Image: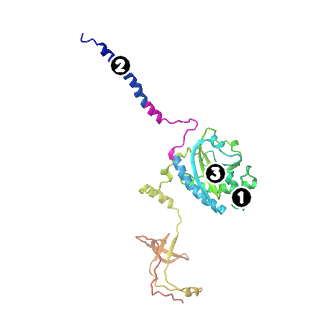
Amino acid sequence: MSDLLSQAEVESLLSSMDRGAAAKPAAAAAPAARLREKVTPYDFKRPERVGKEQMRALQSLHEGFGRNFGAALSALLRTIVEVKLTSVDQLTYSEFVFSLENPTCFNLLRAEPLEGNLILDINPSILFPIIDRLLGGGKESAPPARRPLTEIELRLVGRITSLFLSEMRHAWENVIELKLSVDRVESNPQLVQIVPPNEVVVLISFELTLGDMRGMMNLCIPFNSIERISGKLSSDSWFSYGKTESTEESMRGIAQRLHGSLVQMAVQLAHTQISTNDLVGLRVGDIITTEKDVRAPLLVRVEGVDKFAASLGAFKGRKAIRIENVLATPKPQAAPQPAATTRPKLA
């Protein structure tokens, strides 16, 4: 009879089972809610194929480019032009094309040895004021024209794009040597398709400010063009200048590169002091005497550094020096200190 449960015990056991079943879904719902909070939407139409490190490298590279291009453009236009990097994003080619105005200045660029074409788009809202400035116009703002560029305007725009390509070549030289040129210029961006519409491109946008006029300049780089050199687009490869210890191999490599370099060599015969009055009165055939002994060795400097001691003479009818010894401790060239008692003597 001790194994039998009373009615009260049966009801208590059933009620505890009901409370446990209700608690389990509530406990399972809490981790699921926390998991939903960490989920972020992902659009498969816009895959991020360029890594964050490469994007940071491109941003740092073109920030410096923007400053240099702004200075060069200001010198060309003889007025202050501010060029500021506004964004570095990756999106699809179709999104980039449909975000542009029509007509616009759509430059297709060749960037050998990169594959494919790059695109430089200059917004008409800033392009026409620049053209007006090149033609001698003032700072007065005028409504931007909504028309394709004429032949004369295209020639003037060529000066701007050439300046852009020159500064871009300097900005990229630590990553890769680029041979940049303009393939052609179009006015309707939707008629040009350099990559498939869903292909990922890197869009680098600059804001140009000329007086009270502003406009955008966009550089579009398809991912397939920089995919091969993506390993070089890192902060360690071109932005870091930290000191490293020299090795025998690195020193040998530097020596091989410097083996055929041309250096400036100068021989100091003597030094003395002469007044301006005597200097003005010098004529051909005059002799200036110094305190230096003719048998004393001459100092030979290589790129301004004291390197050898030599003697003066002639070789095959030409003035020559003969290296006598190598100086143990080369030191930078210093301005000579003439003796106070030395006076020029003219004969």
Q: Residue at x 60, y 49 (%)?
A: 205
Q: Pick the residue in front: 154 or 252.
A: 154
Residue 66 inside the magenta-drawn segment: no
Mark 2 vs mark 1: give the one in front. 2
Mark closest to the chain's N terminus, 3 or 2: 2
Quadrant of the drawing holding the C terminus? bottom right
- In terms of image quadrants, where is residue 198? top right
Helix, strand or loop at disc 3? Answer: strand
Tell me how far mark 3 sits from mark 1, CA to CA: 17 Å
For label 2, the residue is 15
- Name the residue that disc number 3 marks: 216
> In the current view of this chain or complex, which residue is farthest to the right?
151
Residue range in magenta is 31-53
The amino acid marked with disc number 1 is Asp
Horizontal side, residue 93 vs residue 323: left or right = right
Q: Amino acid at mark 3?
A: Met
**Quarter containing the N terminus:** top left
